[in-house]
Image: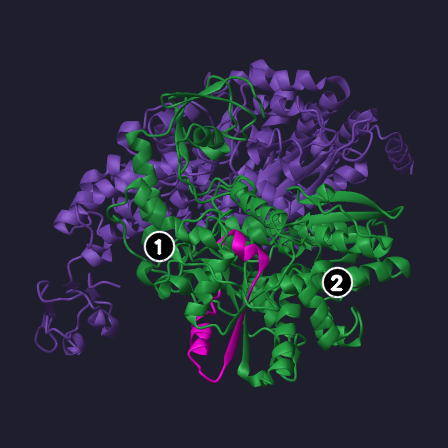
Amino acid sequence: MDNVLKTAEQNLRKNIDLEWYEDQYNTYNKNIKKRVMICAGTGCIASGALKVYAEIQKQCAELNIPVVVEMKEEPQQDSLLLSESGCQGFCQMGPLVTISPDDILYTKVAVKDVTELVEKTLMNGEVIERLLYTDADGTCCKGQNDVPFYSQQTRTILKGCGGVDPASIEEYISQGGYFAARKAISVMADLEICKTMIASGLRGRGGGGFKTGTKWDLTRIQSSEVKYVICNGDEGDPGAFMDRSIMEGNPHAVIEGMMITAKAIGASEGYIYVRAEYPLAVTRLERAIEDAEALGVLGCDLFGTNFDFTVKVMEGAGAFVCGEETALIASIEGKRGMPKPKPPFPAEKGLFGKPTVINNVETLASVPLILNGGVEAYRSVGTEGSPGTKTFALTGHVVNTGLIEVPFGVTLRKIIFDIGGGVTGSDGLKDNSKFKAVQIGGPSGACLTEKDLDLPLDFDSLIGIGAMVGSGGLVVMNTDTCMVKIAKFFMEFTQTESCGKCVLCREGTKQMLSILTDITEGTAKMEDLPVLKELAGAVKKGSLCGLGKTAPNPVLSTLETFYDEIVSHIVDGKCVAEKCAALADPEILADKCIGCRVCKKKCPVDAISGEKKEVHMIDAEKCIKCAACAAACKFEAIVGVGA
Amino acid sequence: MSNKGFVTVDTLKVPIDNERNVLEIIRKGNIDLPTFCYHSELSIYGACRLCVVELNGQSVQASCSIAPKDGMVVKTNTAELREMRKISLELLLANHDNNCTSCSKNSDCKLREISAKVGVESIRYKQNTPKHPIDESAPVTRNPNKCILCGDCVRYCKEVQGIGAIDFAYRGSECVVQPVFGNNMSDVECVYCGQCARVCPTDGINIKSQTNDVWSTLSDGSKTVYAHIAPAVRAAFGEMFNLGPQDDIVGRIVTGLRMLGFDKVYDTSFGADMTVWEEGTECISRIENDGVLPIMTSCCPAWVKYVEHNYHEVLPNLSSCKSPQGMMSSMIKEYHNKEDSIARKDMVTVAIMPCSAKKFEADRPELSKDGFQDTDYVVTTKELGDMFKQAGIDCASLTPSSIDLPLGFKTGGAVLFGNSGGVSEAVLRYVQEKLTGKTNEQIVFDEVRGNEGLREASISIGGKEIRLAIVHGLGNAKKVCEEIKDGVSPYHIVEVMSCPNGCVGGAGQPVPESLDHIIKRKDALYNADATSQLHKPQENIYAASLYEKHVGSVGGHAAHDLFHTTYTPREI
């Protein structure tokens, strides 16, 4: 009752006592014997994490183990705290279950494992070895810190993501949450916050790498009664899920970052623009906003000042181009998401014509860390020009895939071979000799090879070699990858995602795609290559917005780095990775063919020969790759005859 | 904006004088950088990428999107820029239906013109001729296979007219401009002002031609075919024959029309004089009898349709008068039916108009008598120019002939109907005399002249203050309508024309080079009035005698039957 009264009183004063919540949470926490955290990121949910959660809850109830799922009131002694967390990062090994204080990380946990988990680990403190992660060398890793995938990272932004219950504002506060916002709002002047951000050297994590503090300061100096803060959660690169994970896993950090931004620029309204394909992020953000409002962290007269700030979640319809800030603004305004020429920049004329700061999710989540830890500590990580850490989504032909965070300046070699555990061949087994390339920056990025592996990664070094951090997708590719097809894949993406406004992007991406398609289908000529290169150059230089300006990067980098592979497609009619069906030699596989003669009958040009019940042969000279034979073969014995 | 300093454009130092962007500076330096998507009256769009320049030796940017600053150094003509422009053009052409020889826009297509300008010699890219269906459901036609997606039409409709009947749909190379949900133009709130077609650089949006129908009619011996020429036509028709707006062209058009086979050639200005009589009388009656005020003009068919869609509560404010086209066609058929006993089925009226919406107006079922439309065909200024050219007639070298009487007679006031403010001025000339009962020497009302899109005027007549609003552009009309809706409109008379500066800027006119060009046409009509012998519509003696013989009193029963109409609320 006392608590209720105190909360009501605080809300009246609109001056939330963060320390009180912190103390209360810590007091409650003393009654917790074990904490079980089930990764409820989108990946783990897809592999059944919520069923595991429900099963643990059910079995504990049957065994009369006291379980709490939220710390709203004091739990009974020796309770088990059962939580869903945001993405813990090691998605490939999900569903993940961490148990503290034992420091146990169980991987690939299924419902059938729950009985053993409850009896052995929760009741008797035993470790179930078969659920632990075993690395490629056969070493069994008990806790997160024993797993090379984690131990080689520097997890600051992602620390809370997977480490706290995203649905518990109390836990967020207990870990120091909203203290930075309180400091900014009640103690710091707007100029001071901007100066701190400028000094920290924080650069926008959405791709461009523009200095966050400078952006804020440009908005701060605009004289306008109304200003806005927008969180750009329209993460759209294929394979990228850093922002989604942060929004799902630590939504309060994003809100706190926005509050600090708002104070710095003098805004009282904020929007979080999230693509509708991220329903879990939307739900968790909405819950977080609701909780923050209920506690008086968001709303009017915050922390006893006359500063107001409210946040709304806007769902985007999933257009990649809406990640571009002017297109995003148009979308929030209810217009078609198309970029506008800059200037005017959003800092001068943004949402509804008012000065606006747009920052990426990861950027905003970094802001409280800087205010809490100080500029010096922040700058001690990363490089001079790109301080701090960066999250990446590591995927492709690599042993460990998932969400990682590393300091700027780290090399790709470390990411791929230490954190990622090395390269895999097409059989899925580790074979570092199969490394071919790593694609960084998604559709705006480039393919880097062995020669780039020791380059310290940061915003500027990547631009120097024609790539970019982009939002942070890293796709590792082995020698069975056709680089022309990769370039084509990204061009297909940008071509369909172009808004269609400016000529160079709309028509240029289409024509680049057409030439790349010709190359993979064996119909291109060498004369097409200078046309492709010149077109890519024009689109890069002349397009209206960032989407168009970076769309040719995959093409230009492929032309630069894999020129011979392209030429061999055109001149020799060969795809070295044997991935371009149109260029493959037709072949009947001896181990599959039973000599049924069906294909022979179907072939319109008599290219197939062979006796009954004997392996048939196909004459590559005669074959027109109509694929009629392959369609007729019940044994999948015919390859290399086109689609 | 700034008016200090200079921008160095190639070798020129161009002073900054409140230009909005570097493109305007470059053009001021007489370098004709091509653009598709730049129009001074529309927002900056930055999509065509043709105005790219090298800025301060560093980056390539679209000059339309750069604010001029003192000391800027801009290059417009480097090898790289020339190549980029060529690439942009070739990309557009590779995705364009290049059947230019049979394209209705072939003589004034900007895509062709600019391709030639930037020196396109071949198309290096794969040709993908789009195959979208063509929408010819309305007087404004849409051919997405010709559209280059510059967005001029979309912005004009939204920004100037405040309608938004068309917009972009789909993404990337699938992108098209279309009415909502892919509807036909005939099924949406488009008012057919056709300004989208005026700003369209290609045949992507155009005005549906009726020249073939008129040709057939002219060769049908059983029909008597009458033409009447709208006031604004004379200000622009000569442009197609290398004549200036001030050249007197009407007599030559009359000669040409007779050569084409028209039986009688009249002047819509006669109908405009009658409009002043009817509308002026209606205006006085509303003012004196506490009628619905302000009275709003109903000459502009796009405006009328706009009210029918958007402001049902304002419909009673519209004058019940037919437009000059409506009155004229109605009078022609009535007159020749009575005087010459020609059956209505054997009469064809062809209105020569600066306008696309007049085609819609002509087809309104209420504008008919005995089952025959008052106006059978509307050909635009441009279409008539095409007909002359098809017949091998060089209008410039024709000997002028006299227009047919009595329906070719007009006053200078009627000619002003082609200008924004002109209807008001003609009505004032009439109302002033009728209200005061005295012959007034004042002809020119400077208060209602001007180029602003929304102008206010206050005129004292016989001690009574008459307040007017003169509007062009429907976005401006919206403001006036909202005031009326809210019951706070201060006006007695509101004149609305949908097109820039009135009918002289109509979509049926030859494509003007700029808004200044339209203002020159406007000046030509003021000049035509100034040099007329008669200025006040009430001085049209032929109209007076026709009223006496066939109509009776102004505003009377027969006049209502012939010259007034009704309006239909329409859905959006």
Q: CA distance from mark 1 to mark 2?
A: 54 Å
* Residue indicated by mark 1: B95
Q: Which residues are magenta?
A: B208-236
Label 1 in the same subunit as label 2: yes
- Determine whether, in the image, residue A561 is placed left or right of residue A240: left
Residue A550 image offset from top left, x and y in percent: 40, 37
Q: Amino acid at mark 2?
A: Trp
Q: Indicate the quadrant where residue A179 lies.
A: top right
Label 1: few (<14), some (14–19) or many (≥20) C-alpha neighbours in 10 Å: many
The C terminus of chain A, quarter of image: bottom left
| Viewer-proximal residue among A30 and A205 | A205
Which chain is depicted purple? A
What colour has chain B? green
Rendered position, B84 above or below B441: above
Q: Is residue B221 magenta?
A: yes
Q: Chain of mark 2?
A: B
Rendered position, B136 above or below A232: below
The earlier-in-sequence mark between 1 and 2 is 1
* Residue indicated by mark 2: B277
Q: Amino acid at mark 1?
A: Asn
